[in-house]
């Protein structure tokens, strides 16, 4: 028997002072939602997906409603979930507007395909009972304003902050990881970040579950999540390894960000090289949040 645990992040980045409390509280609510699934006997996968759904529904985060936009002002969603017990993966990239991309990724989890992209991913989702939504349902005024600002300031490649992710451990010690995002603000149409790419922004195996956030290109190039999980599986100290890999992504691959990490027995681990990373966790023993 393991102590069940859900740990979530609400994105690496610099959240303005007046919104910090709200960002952190939202993470705690999401962790509690995942915790309720575990308390009812649900699996780590179900808990991680439930937590991410809560954050997708909350417009302050860059996923689902409130997601970042391409430079031409469109929604293009990335999401993935991985079951550490079976090593199954379900992922979608460049998904057209759906309310909960993580639910589509979850539906793909036991299918032979790992990653579906673009309009075909949207058609697959529709064929499997998901309803597409009008793009305007996901786009908020705040996001439009931030896109205009990013394009004006030429910061289009910078990560947006607010990507969401969860790692969970169920009573049997099984691990899962899930991540969902609109990607970087002002990204090129067709761009795929680290979040839906297994081993880059999302990874889970028997020994570790990881969800990353930040400069996706550096996490892709450094194969961040899989390398971190492999090192932990090989016996590295999880907290030290998490920090070391983030510093490597910063110093060798030129990207800032953060990540959350769970192991079969250990505490909820989180670290970042960015200005901050909102996060929250729940277990029957304690809960909390921060940024
Ligand atoms: N990692 C995400 C991406 O590059 C962005 C983020 O985490 O804010 O798509």
Image: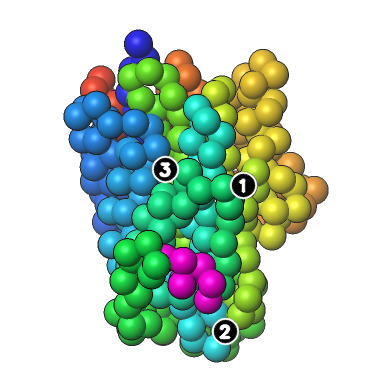
Mark linked to residue 166: 3
Is there a contact, CB below 8 Å, between mark 2 and mark 1? Answer: no
Q: Secondary structure at mark 1?
A: loop
* Marks 3 and 2, the one that precedes in the sequence: 2
Q: Which residues are magenta?
A: 119-125
Label 1 and label 3: CA atoms lie apart by 14 Å
- Give the image quarter of residue 94: bottom right
Q: Position of residue 249 (x, y in %)?
A: 71, 47
- Give the image quarter of residue 268: top left
Q: Residue at x 69, y 60 (%)?
A: 217
Label 2 and label 1: CA atoms lie apart by 25 Å
Q: Is residue 238 left or right of residue 109?
A: right
- Point out the frontmost of discs 2 and 1: 1
The residue beneath circle 2 is 71
* Marks 1 and 3, the one that precedes in the sequence: 3
Q: Secondary structure at mark 2?
A: loop
Q: Nearer the viewer, residue 253 or 164?
A: 164
Q: Residue at x 74, y 42 (%)?
A: 248
Q: Residue at x 35, y 11 (%)?
A: 1
Crowding at dot 3, Cα within 10 Å, few <14 / some 14-19 / many 20+, comes out as: many
* Marks 2 and 1, the one that precedes in the sequence: 2
Q: Is residue 12 above or below residue 239?
A: below
Q: Is residue 230 above or below residue 24?
A: above
Magenta span main SS: helix
């Amino acid at each position: 028997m393991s102590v069940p645990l859900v740990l979530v992040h609400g994105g690496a980045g610099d959240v303005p002072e007046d919104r910090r409390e709200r960002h952190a509280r939202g993470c705690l609510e999401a962790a509690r939602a995942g915790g309720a699934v575990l308390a009812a006997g649900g699996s780590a996968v179900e808990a991680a997906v439930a937590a991410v759904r809560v954050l997708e529904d909350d417009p302050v985060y860059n996923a689902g409603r409130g997601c970042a936009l391409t430079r031409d002002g469109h929604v293009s969603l990335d999401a993935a979930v991985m079951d550490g017990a079976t090593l199954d993966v379900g992922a979608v990239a460049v998904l057209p507007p759906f309310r909960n991309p993580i639910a589509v990724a979850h539906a793909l989890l036991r299918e032979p395909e790992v990653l579906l992209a673009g309009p075909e991913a949207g058609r697959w989702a529709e064929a499997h009972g998901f309803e597409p939504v009008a793009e305007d349902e996901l786009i908020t005024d705040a996001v439009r304003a931030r896109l205009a600002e990013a394009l004006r300031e030429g910061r289009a490649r910078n990560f947006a902050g607010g990507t969401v992710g969860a790692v969970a451990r169920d009573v049997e010690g099984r691990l899962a990881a899930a991540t969902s995002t609109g990607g970087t603000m002002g990204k090129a149409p067709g761009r795929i970040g680290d979040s839906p790419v297994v081993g880059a922004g999302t990874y889970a195996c028997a020994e570790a579950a990881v969800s990353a956030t930040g400069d996706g290109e550096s996490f892709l190039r450094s194969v961040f999540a899989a390398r971190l999980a492999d090192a932990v599986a090989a016996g590295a100290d999880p907290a030290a390894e998490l920090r070391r890999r983030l510093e490597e992504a910063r110093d060798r691959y030129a990207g800032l960000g953060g990540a959350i990490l769970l192991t079969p027995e250990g505490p909820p681990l989180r670290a970042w090289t960015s200005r901050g990373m909102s996060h929250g966790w729940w277990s029957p023993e304690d809960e909390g949040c921060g940024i």
